[in-house]
Image (cartoon, rainbow, N blue to C red):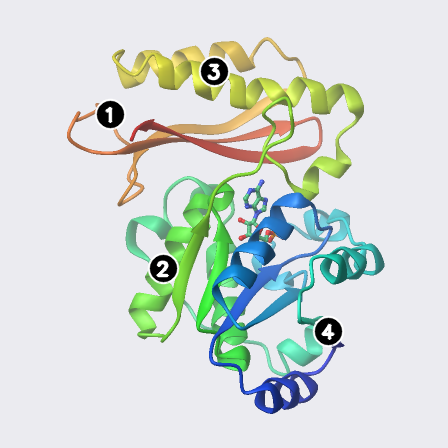
Amino acid sequence: MLVCHTIKALKKYLSKKGAKSVGFVPTMGALHDAHISLINASKKENDLTVGSIFVNPQQFNNQSDLDKYPRSVVADLDKLELAQCDVVFVPSVEEMYPQKVEKEFDFGTLSVVMEAAHRPGHFNGVAIVIERFFEIINPTRAYFGEKDFQQLAVIKALVKQLELPVEIVSCPILRESNGLAMSSRNERLSEVEKKQAGAINRTLQQVAAQKNKSVEALKKYFLDEMSQYENFKVEYFEIADAETLKPADSLDETKKYIAFTAVNVGEVRLIDNMPIID
Ligand code: AMP
């Protein structure tokens, strides 16, 4: 596995290989099994797989969140090597952004609801970095996890808006044995918090099992369950249209819906989602 720190080295490698299809898996490092599942999905469908490790400052609206983001590049490279990733791009901030990018994207509803409302500028930063990666790598396919469902929708909108020649592949959520969605941020939870955080997914499942009730009743149920944990703070809970991600006040049986939540467990912000009507 080759590790490239510069665009020049990566482009040289890619042009030398001349692969028919290139799969790309962007990550912010602190890798776990879910990241590796994306690498495996790419390896199955492409001649060559590029992974990246880059903690993108543009997508953090909170400096302390950026500072606290877990970093473990040496261990990450071992995991990628074991997964037989072909090449890993690990650029510096200066390499990615020689000049500050000031672009402002508009993704309609996606730019204003849920994660967008609670993390101003977050998706704009995500779109900027992904456009830049696509420009450098020119992948055939790029792989994203459904854990970050709104991000996936934003990337699809970005590709459509800019008419980029890349196929976006969505990959299922991987979970710990207690249901907690795998996340690099889980490393910052204590053992007790990790155990408690299983309640987020359990409660989403209970919500899905009661989908005949009103949205208001489902919201109340979720918030009541979460309020049993002193150290949990729910930022939002919404049941949204699976296509538009517009939060719904009532459910139309002919449409698909997904429940979305962000819960702070102690100091750690966790997100999860679950289909309600599939
Ligand atoms: P991150 O390093 O958190 O930016 O994540 C890199 C990619 O891995 C994104 O496409 C995420 O959606 C995906 N990912 C992270 N956690 C999970 C998970 N538990 N299941 C599926 N995909 C995930």
Q: Amino acid at mark 4?
A: Ser
In depth, the one of 237 and 121 nearer the eye is 237
Q: Amino acid at mark 2?
A: Lys
Q: Residues within 10 Å of mark 2 (few under 14, many from 20)?
A: some
| C-alpha span from label 4 to label 2 | 26 Å
Q: Is mark 2 within 8 Å of ligand 1?
A: no
Label located before the other in sequence (3 or 2): 2
Query: Contact (CB < 8 A) between labels 4 and 2?
Result: no
Q: Which mark is residue 223?
A: 3
In depth, the one of 172 and 55 nearer the eye is 172
Q: Which mark is residue 249?
A: 1
| C-alpha span from label 1 to label 4 | 44 Å
Q: Which mark is residue 92?
A: 4
Judging from the image, what secondary structure is the residue with disc 3 in? helix
Residue 102, given in percent of the width and then of the height, sits at: 49, 73
Label located before the other in sequence (4 or 2): 4
Horizontal arrangement in the rendering, residue 268 relative to residue 111 (left or right): right
Q: Which image quarter is the N terminus in?
A: bottom right
Query: Contact (CB < 8 A) between labels 2 and 1?
Result: no
Label located before the other in sequence (3 or 1): 3
The quarter holding residue 197 reads top right
